[in-house]
Amino acid sequence: MKLGRLNHIGVATPSIEDSIAHYREVMGATKIHTPFDLEAQGVKVCFVDTPAHSTGSGSSDSGGTQIELIEPLGPDSPLTNFLEKNPLGGQHHVCFEVPDIEDARKEFEELGKRILGPTRIGAHGTPIFFVHPKDMQGMLTEIMETPKEGTHWSN
Amino acid sequence: MKLGRLNHIGVATPSIEDSIAHYREVMGATKIHTPFDLEAQGVKVCFVDTPAHSTGSGSSDSGGTQIELIEPLGPDSPLTNFLEKNPLGGQHHVCFEVPDIEDARKEFEELGKRILGPTRIGAHGTPIFFVHPKDMQGMLTEIMETPKEGTHWSN
């Protein structure tokens, strides 16, 4: 495959509400999307946009790699264990875009990389899968098909 | 402050050489910079570019958030402890750009955020400082002044 865009970094948090306040008040984020439940993954999700280029006249506050805040939906969430080890939250996964999810899945399988579960619909509404951190230099890695309309998404 | 560009994610690795092979052969990275020693920080550094937009005709392989591979320079490196806990490596820090490092430092200080050490020159040759992960939702956070020539850097 060819390395695609770093769509987002997944950041676990015990409270999306608190994290939104942090990104707005401390970090100065201006484009914070509406949180929503992604029940299939057992998480509540909120995207925070970052600018594609340095802020300045004429630049946009969006278009860069997003921060995907994720909070457990109940005690059976796959995030529960992570937050027990990291009660403040922290960096949970990285997500790269690919043009075709099935081609990418086949390539990772042929390389002997352990794929975690079936290909499913992710937070951006396109197919995704996760690859085991032990096969990815210690990083839980999400592979996501680029949205057809382009790279930028909003809700 | 106003949220700036996510310049890079810092990824610890026990071997930059192995990581370069991973990013080239598994992830398909095409723009991998020359590794160099950043002795003041006790690390060897290698930047891997990601595209700013989905790969396709006319797009560039650079311009997106970079992956900063960091390997300890000797046993006294601040990374040694991280790699003892995470022998395969993994996500170590995030780095956001700001237009003026002293203004940003003052703002973090006024918010009561613990800044780790003095402002110093970082891997991109501009002033940086780190903020304590316990004050930043569990993420070690680097704040970096945007290079004057623009946001894109190469060596």
Image (spheres, coloured by chain):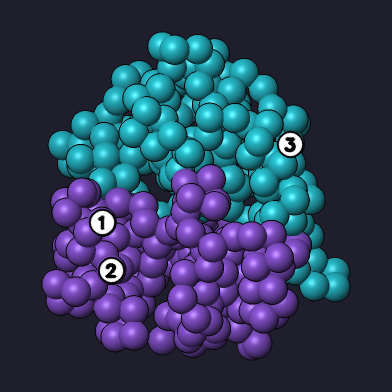
Chain colours: A cyan, B purple
The answer for how far apart the CA atoms under marks 1 and 2 are is 8 Å
The residue that label 1 is drawn on is B82
Spatial CA distance of label 2 from label 3 is 36 Å
A58 relative position to B63: left or right:
right
The answer to which of A60 and A82 lies nearer the viewer is A82
Mark 1 residue element? helix
Tell me the kind of residue under disc 2.
Pro
Q: Is residue A142 or residue B133 the one in the foreground?
A: B133
Identify the residue at horizontal 43%, vertical 80% (top origin): B123
Front tag of 3 and 1: 1
Q: Residue B18: x percent and y percent?
A: 17, 62
| Label 2: how many Cα within 10 Å (few below 14, some 14–19, many 20+) | some
- Give the structural element (helix, strand or loop) at label 3: loop
Q: Quadrant of the C terminus of chain A?
A: top right
Disc 3 marks a residue whose amino acid type is His
Disc 1 to disc 2: CB gap under 8 Å: yes
Mark 1: amino acid: Phe
Q: Quadrant of residue A130?
A: top left
Give the secondary structure at mark 2: loop
Where does residue A24 sit, x and y in percent of width and height?
74, 48
Image location of residue A96, percent across then percent down = 45, 46
Seen in the picture, residue A23 relative to B140 is either above or below; the reply is above
Q: Specify the subunit that label 1 lies on.
A: B
Label 3 packing within 10 angstroms: few (<14), some (14-19), many (20+): some
Q: Residue at x 27, y 78 (%)?
A: B42
Residue A126 at what x, y percent from top left?
Answer: 55, 28
**Which residue does the numbered mark 3 point to in the structure image?**
A33
Q: Is residue A134 above or below residue B80?
A: above
Left or right: B17 as drawn, with respect to A124:
left
Tell me which residue sits at (40%, 62%) in the image. B10
